Image: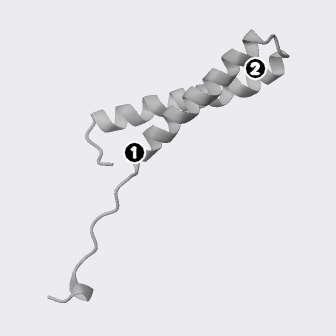
């Protein structure tokens, strides 16, 4: 069998990389929101930092659920 005859392996989701990046985003954005609140900055800035942290937290929940159900990656 030559290389051209072999079927390619099925693609895998990069769930672990996505989990690492979402965790990084949660830490950075959540930390920024906390610092902004402690510095008594305008609520708009706090919300602009907190919103991506919330999105990252939801993404982490989805990723963990998919990993627990056996998805590779």
Q: Name the residue under label 1.
A: 15
Q: For this view, does 62 lie left or right of residue 68?
A: right
Left or right: 67, with 49 as reference point: left
User: Which image quadrant for residue 52?
Assistant: top right
The mark found on residue 46 in the picture is: 2
Farthest residue, direction left: 1
At 38% from the left and 52% from the top, the residue drawn is: 13
Tag 2's secondary structure? helix
Q: Residues within 10 Å of mark 2 (few under 14, many from 20)?
A: many
Tell me the residue at 34%/62% (across/down): 11
Q: Which residue is drawn at 29% across and 64% down?
A: 10
Kindly report the distance in space between the C-alpha atoms of the residues bearing marks 2 and 1: 29 Å
Quarter holding the N terminus?
A: bottom left
Q: In this view, does 2 lie to the left or right of 69?
A: left
Instruction: Give above or below for 45 relative to 25.
Output: above
The quarter of the picture where residue 49 lies is top right
Q: Name the secondary structure under disc 1.
A: helix
């Amino acid at each position: 069998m030559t290389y051209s005859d072999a079927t390619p392996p099925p693609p895998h989701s990069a769930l672990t990389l996505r989990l690492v990046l979402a965790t990084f985003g949660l830490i950075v954005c959540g930390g920024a929101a906390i610092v902004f609140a402690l510095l008594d900055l305008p609520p708009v800035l706090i919300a602009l930092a907190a919103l991506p942290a919330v999105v990252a937290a939801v993404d982490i929940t989805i990723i963990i659920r998919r990993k627990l159900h056996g998805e590779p990656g």
